[in-house]
Image (spheres, grey):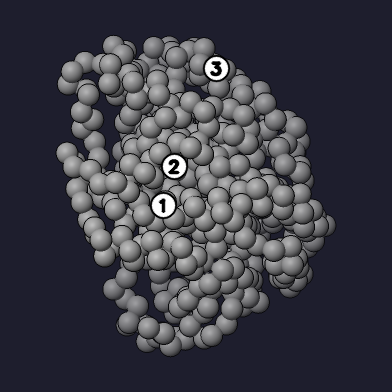
């Protein structure tokens, strides 16, 4: 059903929109009414080039017939089945297919409905894992400043975004934060992984010395932090984190909600960087964003600790009504097939150098103080207006939308993560249009 360009404001009241300044938006709403391949159609009939794959999730672009057909077929055959004490084939098949493309050593899949739920699940699994092995004192969780791990209580506790934390009172206890890895003075305008900052992983040793390794359950990091402005791990940093966590028996969780399913040119960042965590949290690209679904992927060792642990822990007292939902599972299977048949992970790897050059062509553009890239992710950081930290980038977002490109902003940083089907011509259009937008900014 097409919406008029500007529906009457009272039509928009009931929906309390997430992460949106509701009053401002509802005065001048931006509405999408359709999507195909690389473009959204707006309610006033314009085409907008999707520079962000929705919210980092539509990795195969929009309207992939194989995915929409699989959803319709599954909904007609078996629309819903409980996942508690019951099974259905699609959930098992999808788990096997995820494991096929996951790094060697990853052997099990636990389904959720979102990235936030994947994070909560992984944090709980980490604590229970140690308990199953007789180390029940290991409950402490470690995240990072500027980490984003979704919006549930565990996720905002280990996360490091002040705005997401400060409204919500008492968070989880027993949480520490390592520093983020953003070092503009040393690494500005790095192409790919920055040279400086691997030593920031050593901060984990400080936390271990402070609390004792025997109290620490897990460290959670995004291999590439996306939502806080695209922070690429310095060379050697993730390797160091892996070595320190392994030395102290601490589980390492990679939050691959953004980096999973091809964004960096491999199925997972873990393969791209050659570092194997104990668990990976995923969502988004698992179903191409079409149906909500997430998954925690674990090594055999994590799973086997439960299965070989005390009798009362063989059943995991955790799960969701929609864990492994049949329609979501069918969407996931079809999505993984599309990625494979269209060679989209390889395509992302091939396009990455072209993308890097395009994004870095904005070095020297008005207000630009840093440009960062990895895989098919790019960020352009603008000099903020004193006292108005998000204003300039948000103005860029609005101007970009009017000129027909969708970008995303966080603080004064513009982030881009197009569908992996993007062409070189469309990369030129996206970056060229952004360049024009920057010229026009105050
Ligand atoms: N973790 C990371 C790294 C994310 O980027 C996101 C979402 N951008 C989440 C978790 C939360 O996912 P969701 O919005 O599906 O709950």
Residue shown at 75% from the left, 71% from the top: 436
Q: Are marks 1 and 2 in contact (CB under 8 Å)?
A: yes
Q: In this view of the protein, can residue 437 be seen by the observer?
A: yes
Query: Which class describes the residues within 10 Å of circle 2: few (<14), some (14-19), or many (20+)?
Result: some
Label located before the other in sequence (1 or 2): 2
Secondary structure beneath dot 3 equals helix
Residue behind mark 1:
332
**Residue in view at x 31 percent, y 14 percent:** 133
Q: Which mark is residue 97?
A: 2
In the image, residue 380 sits, relative to residue 403, either above or below, namely above
Q: In the image, 16: left or right of 384?
A: left
Tell me the CA gap for discs 2 and 3: 31 Å
Which of labels 1 and 3 is toward the front?
Answer: 1
Looking at mark 1, is its residue's CB closer than 8 Å to ligand 1?
Answer: no
Q: CA distance from mark 1 to mark 2?
A: 9 Å
Tell which tag, 1 or 2, sits nearer the viewer. 2
Residue in view at x 46 percent, y 29 percent: 106
Earlier sequence position, callout 1 versus callout 3: 3
Tell me if residue 79 comes above or below residue 63 in the rendering: above
Q: Is residue 357 left or right of residue 279?
A: right
Residue on which the image places disc 3: 244
């Amino acid at each position: 059903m097409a919406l008029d360009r500007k529906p009457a404001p009272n039509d928009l009241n009931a929906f309390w929109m997430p992460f949106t300044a509701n009053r401002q938006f509802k005065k001048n709403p931006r509405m999408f009414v359709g999507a195909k391949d690389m473009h959204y159609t707006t309610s006033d009939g314009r085409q907008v080039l999707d520079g962000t794959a929705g919210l980092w999730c539509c990795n195969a672009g929009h309207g992939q017939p194989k995915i929409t057909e699989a959803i319709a077929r599954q909904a007609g055959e078996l629309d819903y089945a409980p996942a508690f004490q019951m099974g259905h084939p699609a959930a098992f098949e999808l788990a096997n297919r995820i494991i096929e493309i996951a790094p060697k050593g990853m052997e099990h899949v636990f389904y959720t409905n979102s990235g936030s739920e994947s994070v909560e699940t992984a944090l709980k699994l980490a604590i229970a894992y140690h308990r199953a092995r007789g180390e029940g004192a290991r409950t402490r969780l470690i995240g990072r400043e500027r980490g984003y791990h979704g919006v549930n209580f565990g996720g905002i506790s280990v996360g490091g975004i002040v705005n997401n934390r400060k409204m919500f009172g008492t968070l989880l206890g027993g949480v520490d934060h390592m520093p983020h890895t953003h070092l503009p003075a040393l690494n500005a305008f790095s192409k790919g992984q920055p040279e400086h900052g691997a030593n920031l992983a050593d901060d984990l040793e400080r936390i271990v010395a402070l609390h004792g390794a025997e109290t620490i359950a897990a460290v959670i990091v995004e291999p590439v932090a996306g939502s806080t402005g695209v922070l690429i791990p310095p060379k050697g940093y993730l390797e160091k984190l892996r070595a320190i966590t392994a030395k102290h028996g601490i589980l390492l969780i990679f939050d691959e909600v953004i980096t999973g399913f091809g964004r960096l040119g491999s199925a997972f960042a873990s393969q791209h960087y050659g570092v194997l965590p104990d668990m990976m949290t995923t969502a988004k690209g698992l179903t191409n964003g079409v149906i909500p679904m997430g998954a925690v992927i674990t090594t055999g060792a994590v799973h086997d600790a439960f299965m070989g642990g005390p009798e009362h822990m063989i059943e995991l007292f955790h799960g969701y009504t929609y864990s492994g939902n049949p329609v979501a599972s069918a969407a996931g299977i079809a999505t993984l097939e599309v990625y494979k048949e269209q060679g989209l992970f390889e395509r992302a790897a091939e396009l990455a150098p072209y993308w890097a050059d395009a994004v870095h062509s904005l070095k020297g553009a008005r207000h630009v103080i840093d440009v960062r890239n990895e895989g098919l992710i790019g960020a352009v950081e603008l000099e903020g207006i004193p006292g108005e930290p998000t204003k300039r980038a948000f103005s860029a977002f609005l101007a970009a939308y009017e000129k027909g490109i969708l970008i995303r902003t966080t603080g004064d940083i513009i982030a881009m993560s197009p569908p992996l089907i993007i062409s070189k011509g469309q990369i030129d259009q996206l970056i060229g249009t952004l360049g024009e937008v920057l010229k026009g900014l105050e």
